Amino acid sequence: MIPCRFVVFGVAVVVAACSSGVRSSFLATDPSFTPSPGATPMVYLDPSEVPRIPLRSVGIIEVTVPGSSGVSGAVEAAAAKGREIGCAMLVEHSVFDEVVSRARGGGHGATFVFAHGGGPEPAHHESSSDDGTLTAEFDCVVRADERREVAIRRPG
């Protein structure tokens, strides 16, 4: 039998986590991707650090955290959601757009695959609001299967 103090402590932890003001969501952009829990993904905020390997964006993770937790709080919340979804890595959305632009121009060295017919649709925003929160978006990225890449690449 579990002593009552442990049950009360467990409930207090759950209540504290729920009231932390952290919200996260996942918008799938690739219907062929099936979310499943995985390892905690690396998070990239600088285009020069994004690995130069075949990559595929499968969706957008949006997080809202208390402004006091700053960018590091947003990164932690995004990584937790990315682990839940099964992202291999997360790339801040405007950084992802920049890396894709460079790759299309031949400047990054990575191949980006858009199985869903185009780049991520949601507009980037990293903003602080009047309610004291910070919102940021990250592309959930997985390694592209190079054999599959040939079949799904669209011309143009």
Image (cartoon, rainbow, N blue to C red):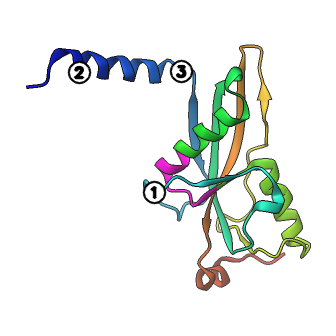
Question: Dot 3 lies on which element?
Answer: loop
- Asked if residue 146 lies left or right of residue 20, the reply is right
Identify the residue under disc 3. 20
Report the amino acid beneath label 3.
Ser
At x 53%, y 21%, the residue is: 20
Which of the two marks, 2 or 3, is nearer to us in this view?
Answer: 2
Range covered by the magenta-colored residues: 81-89
Q: In terms of depth relative to the viewer, which is nearer, 109 or 5?
A: 5
Q: Quadrant of residue 30?
A: bottom right
75 left or right of 105 in image: left
Residue 112 percent across, percent down from the top left: 73, 70
Local secondary structure at mark 2: helix
The amino acid type, in three-letter code, at marker 2 is Phe
Q: Earlier in the sequence, mark 1 or mark 3?
A: 3
The residue singled out by tag 1 in the image is: 38
Which callout, 2 or 1, points to the residue nearer the camera?
Answer: 2
Q: Secondary structure at mark 1?
A: loop
Quarter containing the N terminus = top left
* Number of residue marks: 3
Question: Quick one: label 2, few (<14), some, or many (20+) residues within 10 Å?
Answer: few
Q: Are marks 1 and 3 in contact (CB under 8 Å)?
A: no
Question: Mark 3 or mark 2, which is nearer the start of the sequence?
Answer: 2
Q: Mark 2 highlights which residue?
A: 6
